[in-house]
Image (cartoon, rainbow, N blue to C red):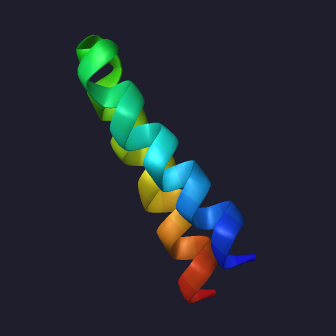
Amino acid sequence: MQKFLLTVLAGALLTAPVAAETTQRDLEVIGRALGFVDG
């Protein structure tokens, strides 16, 4: 489970600079992921 979450977060961090225009969307996805972890 942790490996999957780390992969998702790492992918988001690597994709953010490439798709700077979708940073807001990335933040929303990360927020949802973190909320899923907390929940």
As drawn, is 10 to the left or to the right of 2? Answer: left
Q: In which quarter of the image is residue 31?
A: bottom left
- Residue 11: x and y in percent read 50, 40
Q: Quadrant of residue 26?
A: top left
Camera-side residue: 5 or 32? 5
- Residue 3: x and y in percent read 66, 69
Q: Relative to 23, is 28 above or below?
A: below
As drawn, is 11 to the left or to the right of 1? Answer: left
Q: Relative to 8, is 38 above or below?
A: below
Most extreme residue toward the right is: 1
- Residue 36: x and y in percent read 63, 73
User: What residue lies at 35% left-to-right and 19% top-to-bottom?
Assistant: 22
As drawn, is 22 to the left or to the right of 11? Answer: left
User: What residue lies at 42% left-to-right and 46% top-to-bottom?
Assistant: 28
Camera-side residue: 22 or 13? 13
User: What residue lies at 63% left-to-right and 87% top-to-bottom?
Assistant: 39
User: What residue lies at 24% left-to-right and 23% top-to-bottom?
Assistant: 17
Q: Relative to 15, is 19 above or below?
A: above
As drawn, is 36 to the left or to the right of 35? Answer: right
Camera-side residue: 24 or 4? 4
| Number of numbered tags placed on the structure image | 0
Quadrant assignment for the N terminus: bottom right
Most extreme residue toward the bottom is: 38
